[in-house]
Image: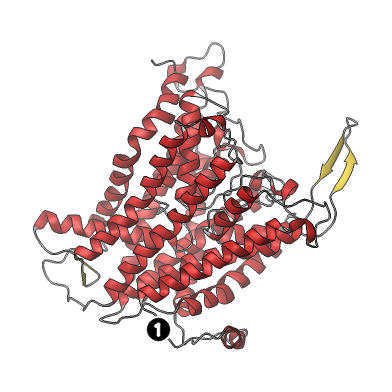
Amino acid sequence: MTAMSWGLLLIFLLTLLMLALPLGRYLVKVADAGWRPRVIGAAEGLLYRTAGVAPQADMTWKQYAGAVLVFNVLGILAVFAVQMAQAALPLNPQQFGNLTWDSALNTAVSFVSNTNWQGYAGETTMSYLTQMMALTVQNFLSAATGIAVAFALIRGFARRQQPGVGNFWVDVTRITLYVLLPVSLVFALVLVSQGVIQNFDPYVSYTTLEGHAQTLAMGPVASQEAIKMLGTNGGGFFNANSAHPFENPSELTNFLQMLSIFVIPAALCFTFGNMTGDRRQGWAVLAAMTLIFVLGAVALTSAEQQGNPLFTPLGVDQQAGLLQSGGNMEGKEVRFGIAASSLFATITTAASCGAVNAMHDSLTPLGGMVPTLMMQLGEVVFGGTGSGLYGMLALAVLAVFVAGLMIGRTPEYLGKKIEAFDMKMVALIILVTPLLVLTGTALSVLVEPGLAGMLNHGAHGFSEVLYALSSAANNNGSAFAGLSANTPYYNLLLAVAMFVGRFGVILPVLALAGSLAAKKYVPVSAGSLPTHGPLFVGLLVGVVLLIGALTYLPALALGPIVDHLQLHGIR
């Protein structure tokens, strides 16, 4: 990596830390149902009375899970209905028609599950009303759902012999009202000030200097862009997503968007430490996430700066390390360059955010393997809003279980004994997404509808299919490109992967939260494993990487690794 790349990474991490610390403390207050801010606190009670919610009622994990499912299934139906009636609804200056049922279903599941996979081009498919009332609304609600589940799991660790894990309706209301709405409003205004568009104008037609007719898409972009990033959603208003100058016009907006993706997931680590009464625990989780993230960013940036061996300048020895003059700029915006594009790609796949500012299909094979692996690790390297933390905490439980086996002692984490039921739930959390990814990929390269969508064949085509399933099942939403996924086969397959990948993980997480909340506290003894020091951080990182390697290495070997060997002429 160049000095500029190291400097960008360092500045990013330091700025992220300065923002995440105060936000993490603020989220502790949001999780406390008794705290009300003066300015908009009265609105909360009005919402409860209107909806008939009893805010003081504490839910068991089963009740909490039921509320999560009902809320999100209703969200899927609402988004589906808006898309199927789009042609008859207002705010449609381009007179776009209704979507096909399979595309509408895929999109509805995608946005409700916080995946935001897009099999369509937004500016040629969705009306302004659909973008706002269906997609942007779910950007808020899906992000709030993830944070609410994280709150429930943290309460499971913090509470002692209590049957409840909180109230979902209170959690999702407070998160939306006190965190996502105000921060998104401020961020949207900042984006507008930097050139991101926000209007309801019809599309603008003009003639280029070369004499060709061209149309510029307009729309309420900044308002969707803000929550798209803050909520780790990623669904772009435009097909080019954050590579489009109307979504991401400059180096400054690019840096701010990268920060916004990570700020809530990082802040939740501090929330975890504060709510459990031991801030060191939050620092330990954050350290594990950061270490894996830095390794991924360095690997991806180095691969892209090294470049493509097929473009070696004449007279240059490949062994000297310079394979392509200036590195691999294919698929990247000149205004961002390799360093910012590589960092963005690592961030967006470490978090479950599908936003992209470069085309991942144009990455070098090893460069493209990094985003794929980041998703396959379970989106726990910061991860999505809430989902990253609860996924990493499940792996932390596994880490202390492994340590307990080594010394022949019943494992404990934060004063809670880890027993058989807890490990069964952790096993489900870990195994759901690999099952979806590997089964879906194998099926797609065997059946005709799956093969028909592949524009490339061989190792690179396999990588595209593997990336798509990894993105869907881990609720990331970014696309490798090169795969025609807007077909009935892929729309339905990916919809199943997104739904089960989201709620098939949330349910055992909530079951784990309920089990932990009901346990009594076990005082720390001389035999307890410290879970806040470098030893535990190393153990946790090792568990994350080993599970990812053991699960996905054979598939990666068939895709990006073979692609890399073929690129370098190794048979």
**Which residue is outermost to the top?**
315
Q: Quadrant of residue 52?
A: bottom right
Q: How are the colours assigned in the image? A: secondary structure
Q: Nearer the viewer, residue 27 or 54?
A: 54
Residue visible at 19% across and 55% down in the picture: 402
Could you tell me if residue 135 is visible in this image?
no
93 shown above or below 162:
above
Give residue 260's position: percent from left, percent from top: 56, 59
- Specify few, some or many for label 1: CA neighbours under 10 Å numbering under 14, 14-19, or 20 or more: some
Q: Nearer the viewer, residue 59 or 389?
A: 59
Above or below, 465 against 492 in this view is above
In the image, residue 285 above or below residue 39? above
Q: Which residue is mark 1?
A: 58
Is residue 299 among the parts visible in the rendering? yes
Residue drawn at x 60%, y 58% as measured from the top left: 228
Which residue type does callout 1 highlight?
Asp
Farthest-out residue, left: 408
Query: Which is nearer the eye, 226 or 291?
Result: 226
Residue 191 image offset from top left, x and y in percent: 69, 59
Please report the residue visible at 24 percent of the width from the left and 56 percent of the height from the top.
399
Q: Position of residue 57 (x, y in %)?
A: 43, 86
Rendered position, 447 above or below 162: above
Tell me where residue 208 sits by quadrant. Answer: top right
Q: Quadrant of the C terminus?
A: top left
**Count of residue discs:** 1
As helix, strand or loop, the secondary structure at mark 1 comes to loop
